[in-house]
Each structure stands twice: as structure tokens, then as C-alpha cells.
Image (cartoon, rainbow, N blue to C red):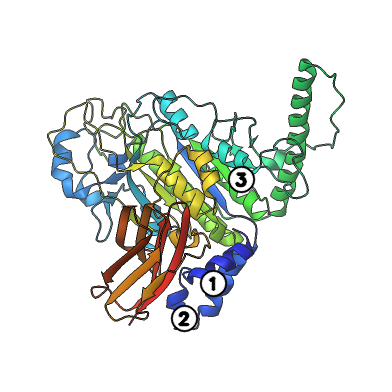
């Protein structure tokens, strides 16, 4: 989000995180400076961490209310309650290896989203990975990725004319070897694959040579364009890496080394919005846990590596002054079965939790921890609560301030948003003035009436508090009249500022209300 867009949204909604609390203390000026600087600096960044193999969600985020039932259906891998990292006032606990995640959660910088997946789950690694990378339905095959289509909707001429003065940096970066489908658009691939920018070869500026005006010439011209583009991007990456001479300590693991590079490039000024890093080993059919101590073993080691790498990444971003403009998300192609197997492991399952982390994370948990009956059989799986494309839609809208056209190009549909970014449901609202909208009395003591002209069709009216958290839904459905009126009782809510989020057709807007 650019500075002018940020100020427009801030002035319109007055719901920047921390503003209302800061109005009554001396930190208001610092809070304002922080968010204006965030909007004025380089664009926001999303780092995607792919946990290859299918992470066991039930041993990562444990539904502690159903521990006795879990003991009945997964005795080979279940962990003792005394070793779990319990979340205050939560219906779940974290794996003992995730102590850093627990701290981030308590600080409001990490969100747990329960039971994420897609309908008609495929239990094939390859197919399910393609679905998550492409953002497709389970019954279709797409050759492009959701972020690739998002980038393509914003830069339709790419790769012709890129890099240029306005966009000198790579559109996306993958750390490691090989290009994934994730950043593949319908016409071009938007990612640059790098290993270690410190050892990047010295790149020369070369012009694309003339080619014959034939079909073969067109293909050769494209290959030479991509080669020249890679050389230019390589130099940009190298320069960005060289600007950072000091970093916090990272674990010497595959993921730790990848995130160290990502932090270095971000802090060095690279304005690349999207990164992908990978961590393998989560296909734990056997020896998932140590037979003598289920808190140890392969899965515990993997989660420890994830925990330590992410915590080091967050600490380094704070050290570099980049933390406020970076968000991260973990994902895996599927979870594991509810019922464990006799090899001290778990087999391919369906829905699983994912983590969204960063200083601007909405925090807390979304959804409810899975309900376990204790009578499940092998074929049973965790029911879906959130489609993964809801998370994609929410990140694009709330973090990148993407418009409906770009979001629909990325997700190929209309998916309901969920709160993932502090105040994202407010700052993402379009600045459109509704027709004859009245909310009265304002300020109010208890009952308030909303009256407005509407376009027949879909209408949604929700209320959030000053932190952006959803308070109530006044109306959700179809209207067949041209005027809407409804009263709402606020007597059960504390005094303060509230924001009405109104969506009518393709128009969205907000209106403030003060409860005395």
C-alpha cells in the first residue's frame, strides 16, 4: 500500500491498529510515525514457507479438550498433556518444539488458523501440491500458480520491458534449486531462483541479439530475453545483499539459511513482494516419534527447525528495521490421518492448521480445534473449516491492498475473507461514498438505526471494534428493494469507537459510530 493510499484509508476509517489506545497516551506520535513510515517505505513482503510432505496438524496444534479421545485413536504418536505448550484460554496446545511460536502467539504476532484445506481432498503429494500452488479446485488441472496470476494481472506486459526504472527488482524470488508452479503466470514465469547471493557471479549487461523473423526466431528471442533479464536481476540481488553486513544468528539448517537470505535481501532494499522457501521431510509414515518419548523424533526435529528458523527470521527483521512490512505463512499440501499407524507414524490426511506470522498478524486463532470422538476409523479425516483460497484472498486484500480483479485472477473465484492482518478488514475497504447512508443517533447510548439506499442484490453489514475485530453481523443476505433500514442494539458492547463494514454488490464502504 502506497503512502497516499494509506493516508486515504486512515483518514476514512480512523482504525489504524493501536490508534485508539494511543489517543489517550504519549505514544500516539510514535504510533503515527510507525505506520506512516511503513506505508512510505518499500512495498510489503509476503514470505511463504512450504512444509513439503504433509505436516501432521494434530501433533502440531493439539486439541487438548479431546486428549483422552486422541489417546484412543493415535496411541502410537500422542504426546502427554504435561509436555504440551498450552495456550491460555485456548482449546489447543502447541507441540513442545514450538516454544518460539508460543511466544509469538502470546505477543500477538502469530495466528493459528484451524483445519485449512480444500473440498474433495487429493491424497497424492504431487496433485495436492499442484492444487495449493495453483489455487485450483481438486477436479481441475491448472498450469499456472495463484501468485503468478496475481502478478500477471498487475503486470500484463511482463517479461517484455522488464526490468525497468519503475520495477528494477524481481517480481518473486525462490530460494533453492528449480522453479515451482507458484509464480508461473499464464504467459510467463515471474520468479527468480537463487541460492546464495553472496557468491553470485559477476553479471554483465548484454543486449538481446537480433533474431530471424520466424517461429524459431520468436522462441530464441524469448530465451535471450529471459537470459538477459536474469542477468540484470542477478546484479540487483547481489547489490541488495551486499548492503547488509550484519545479521542476527540463524540456525545452520536448510530453512534457517534460506530465511537468512530472504531477510538480507529485504533489508538490503530489494522490493520483491513475494518469496518462497521450502522445508522437506514432513511425510512421516513411520518413525514420526521416538517410541520411548513421543515428544522426540523426526516430527519434533522438523518442528524445532521450523520454530528456530522463524524466530531467528523475526529477530533479524526487527534488528534490520524491516519487521513491520513482512508477513509470513506456512502451508503444506495436506495434513495426516486422525488414526495413527503401527509404524509410529501417520498417513496422508486432509485439513490441517497453518500459521500466519508477522508484526501485523491479526493474532489469536481462527476457527475451533478439531473435535475428536475417539471412535474414528482409518479413513476418517479432519473436517474442513477454511478453504485455503480464503487465506490467499485475505492476504492479497488485507496485506497487499489488492483489488477484486487481481484477487479473482489469482484465486479464480470469490472466496470470503477471514481476518489475517491487524485492521485489514477495515483498511482494505474501498473509499466509495454510499448513497443516503444514515446511522443515527451518532453518538449513541444503546440502539442505533442504519438507513441507506441500496442496489438490489447481495448486502452485508458487519460491525468491528476499533482494533478491527469482528463484533457482530447486522445483515447478510439478498435484498430486493432499493432502500434498507434496520436497528441494532449496542447495549451489550462497551463504550468506544465502532466501524460499520458495508458491502453492496461490488461496492464497499465504512462508517464510524461512537457508543457513549
Q: Quadrant of residue 73?
A: top left
Front residue of this view, candidates 320 and 215: 215
Q: Secondary structure at mark 1?
A: helix
Q: Is residue 142 above or below residue 66?
A: above
Q: Is residue 157 above or below residue 404?
A: above
* Circle 2 or circle 3, nearest the eye: 2
Q: Are marks 1 and 2 in contact (CB under 8 Å)?
A: no
The residue that disc 3 covers is 261
Quarter placement of the C terminus: bottom left
The residue that disc 2 covers is 23
Expressed as whole percent of the image width and height from the top left, the position of residue 451 reads 36, 68
Front residue of this view, candidates 351 and 104: 351
Expressed as whole percent of the image width and height from the top left, the position of residue 475 reads 30, 59
User: For the residues marked 1 and 2, what is the alpha-carbon distance in whole angstroms?
Assistant: 15 Å
Dot 1 or dot 2, earlier in sequence:
1
Dot 3 or dot 1, earlier in sequence:
1
Front residue of this view, candidates 144 and 441: 441
User: For the residues marked 3 and 1, what is the alpha-carbon distance in whole angstroms?
Assistant: 37 Å
The residue that disc 1 covers is 11
Label annotation for residue 139: none
* Circle 1 or circle 2, nearest the eye: 1
Left or right, residue 222 beside residue 108: right
Residue at the spot 54% in from the left edge and 50% down from the top edge: 403
User: For the residues marked 2 and 3, what is the alpha-carbon distance in whole angstroms?
Assistant: 39 Å
Quarter placement of the N terminus: bottom right
Crowd class of label 3 (few under 14; some 14 to 19; many from 20; radius 10 Å): many
Expressed as whole percent of the image width and height from the top left, the position of residue 5 reads 60, 62
Crowd class of label 1 (few under 14; some 14 to 19; many from 20; radius 10 Å): few
Crowd class of label 2 (few under 14; some 14 to 19; many from 20; radius 10 Å): few
Residue at the spot 44% in from the left edge and 83% down from the top edge: 24
Left or right, residue 399 beside residue 451: right
Q: Do we see residue 303 in this rendering?
A: yes
Amino acid at each position: 500500500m502506497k503512502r497516499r493510499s494509506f493516508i486515504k484509508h486512515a483518514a476514512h476509517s480512523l482504525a489504524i491498529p493501536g490508534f485508539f489506545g494511543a489517543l489517550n497516551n504519549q505514544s500516539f506520535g510514535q504510533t503515527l510515525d510507525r505506520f506512516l513510515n511503513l506505508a512510505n517505505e518499500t512495498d510489503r513482503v509476503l514470505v511463504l514457507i512450504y512444509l513439503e510432505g504433509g505436516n501432521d496438524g494434530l501433533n502440531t496444534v493439539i486439541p487438548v479438550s479431546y486428549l483422552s479421545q486422541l489417546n484412543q485413536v493415535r496411541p502410537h504418536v500422542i504426546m502427554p498433556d504435561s509436555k504440551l505448550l498450552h495456550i491460555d484460554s485456548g482449546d489447543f496446545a502447541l507441540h513442545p518444539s514450538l516454544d518460539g511460536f508460543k511466544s509469538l502467539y502470546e505477543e500477538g504476532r502469530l495466528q493459528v488458523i484451524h483445519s485449512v484445506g480444500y473440498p474433495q481432498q487429493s491424497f497424492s503429494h504431487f496433485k495436492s501440491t499442484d492444487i495449493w500452488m495453483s489455487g485450483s479446485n481438486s477436479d481441475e488441472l491448472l498450469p499456472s500458480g495463484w501468485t503468478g496470476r496475481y502478478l500477471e494481472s498487475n503486470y500484463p506486459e511482463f517479461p517484455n520491458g522488464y526490468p525497468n526504472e519503475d520495477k528494477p527488482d524481481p517480481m518473486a524470488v525462490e530460494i533453492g534449486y528449480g522453479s515451482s508452479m507458484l509464480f508461473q503466470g499464464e504467459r510467463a514465469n515471474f520468479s527468480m531462483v537463487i541460492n546464495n547471493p553472496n557468491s553470485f557471479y559477476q553479471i554483465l549487461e548484454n543486449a538481446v541479439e537480433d533474431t530471424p523473423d520466424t517461429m524459431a526466431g520468436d522462441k530464441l528471442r524469448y530465451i535471450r530475453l529471459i537470459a538477459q533479464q536474469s542477468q540484470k536481476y542477478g546484479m540487483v540481488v547481489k547489490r541488495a545483499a551486499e548492503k547488509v553486513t550484519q545479521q542476527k544468528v540463524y540456525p545452520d539448517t536448510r530453512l534457517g539459511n534460506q530465511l537468512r537470505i530472504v531477510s538480507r535481501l529485504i533489508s538490503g532494499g530489494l522490493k520483491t513482494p513475494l518469496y518462497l522457501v521450502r522445508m522437506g521431510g514432513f511425510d512421516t509414515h513411520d518413525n514420526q516419534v521416538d517410541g520411548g518419548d513421543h515428544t522426540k523424533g523426526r516430527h519434533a526435529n522438523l518442528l524445532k527447525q521450523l520454530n528456530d528458523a522463524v524466530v531467528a527470521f523475526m529477530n533479524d527483521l526487527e534488528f534490520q528495521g524491516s519487521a513491520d512490512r513482512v508477513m509470513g505463512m506456512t502451508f503444506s499440501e495436506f495434513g495426516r490421518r486422525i488414526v495413527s499407524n503401527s509404524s509410529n507414524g501417520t498417513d496422508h490426511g486432509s485439513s490441517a492448521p497453518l500459521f500466519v506470522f508477522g508484526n501485523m498478524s491479526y493474532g489469536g486463532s481462527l476457527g475451533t480445534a478439531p473435535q475428536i470422538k475417539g471412535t474414528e476409523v482409518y479413513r476418517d479425516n479432519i473436517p474442513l473449516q477454511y478453504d485455503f483460497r480464503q487465506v490467499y484472498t485475505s492476504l492479497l486484500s488485507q496485506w497487499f491492498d489488492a483489488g477484486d480483479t487481481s484477487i479473482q485472477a489469482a484465486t479464480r473465484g470469490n472466496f470470503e475473507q477471514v481476518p489475517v492482518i491487524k485492521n485489514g478488514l477495515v483498511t482494505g475497504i474501498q473509499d466509495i461514498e454510499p448513497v443516503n447512508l444514515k446511522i443515527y443517533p451518532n453518538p449513541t447510548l444503546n440502539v442505533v438505526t442504519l438507513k441507506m439506499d441500496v442496489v438490489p442484490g447481495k448486502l452485508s453489514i458487519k460491525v468491528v471494534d476499533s482494533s478491527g475485530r469482528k463484533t457482530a453481523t447486522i445483515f447478510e443476505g439478498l435484498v430486493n428493494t432499493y432502500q434498507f433500514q434496520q436497528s441494532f442494539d449496542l447495549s451489550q458492547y462497551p463504550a468506544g469507537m465502532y466501524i460499520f463494514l458495508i458491502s453492496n454488490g461490488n461496492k464497499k464502504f465504512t462508517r464510524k459510530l461512537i457508543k457513549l
